[in-house]
Amino acid sequence: MKEMTVNMLHVLSAIGKLEPVNGITISKQFGFSKGNVSKITKRLAEKQIIILEYIPDNKKEILFRTTSLGKEINTLHQALHTQIDIGVNQFLQRYNDDELRFLVNVFHETLQASWFPMESNEDSQALSKSKPKSIIGADPDKATVPNEMNEVIEILNKLDSRNLKKAKAILSTVFFSVYED
């Protein structure tokens, strides 16, 4: 597992859920490019984590199946996701419904935001001096941003662009992915 990348684990998971499956289906259903699927499945096959099945009379289409090692790694990967889900749920128990709605709104807006300011320098300065947005439905003059939100903003402000991208991906996965029980 030490040599497995996150993308390798997710392609393996896709194969495990849909096997036998071809690369185009993995690409379409899970949002990976066809090139990435091809590279990743080649690496997984080299490590004997998946096997390739060729369809008779069809030289182009290849189906993928997990090996016993692939099934074991996939089971560990799913257990890891379960542990993460438990940890996230325990963490989120600290917050009431209004705070969670606010966080979801902020994270959703963060995913939509451009981190490259397009406005003039004067506009940027005016924005930086403006009041922070209040919780949805609250009177903007009376509501304040919770301390937890200020802490989150401080943490995000300390991140470099690479780690900010990771934070964005994590937030997207945790708050906007649909999980099946």
Image (cartoon, grey):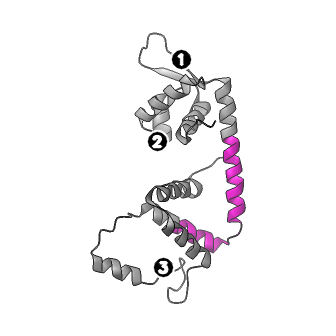
The three-letter code of the residue at mark 3 reads: Lys
The three-letter code of the residue at mark 1 reads: Glu
Q: For mark 1, what is the residue? A: 53
The three-letter code of the residue at mark 2 reads: Gly
Crowdedness of circle 3 by 10 Å Cα count: few (<14), some, many (20+)? Answer: few
- The residue under the point 48% across, 20% down is 62
Majority secondary structure in the magenta region: helix
- Part of the protein shown in magenta: 78-106
Q: For mark 2, what is the residue? A: 31
As drawn, the residue found furthest toward the top would be 57
Tell whether 125 sits left or right of 56.
left
Q: For mark 3, what is the residue? A: 133
The residue tagged with tag 3: helix, strand or loop?
loop
Quadrant of the image for the N terminus? top right
- The residue under the point 67% across, 41% down is 78
The residue tagged with tag 1: helix, strand or loop?
strand
- The residue under the point 53% across, 76% down is 136
Give me the C-alpha separation between circle 3 and circle 2: 33 Å
Does the magenta segment cover residue 55? no
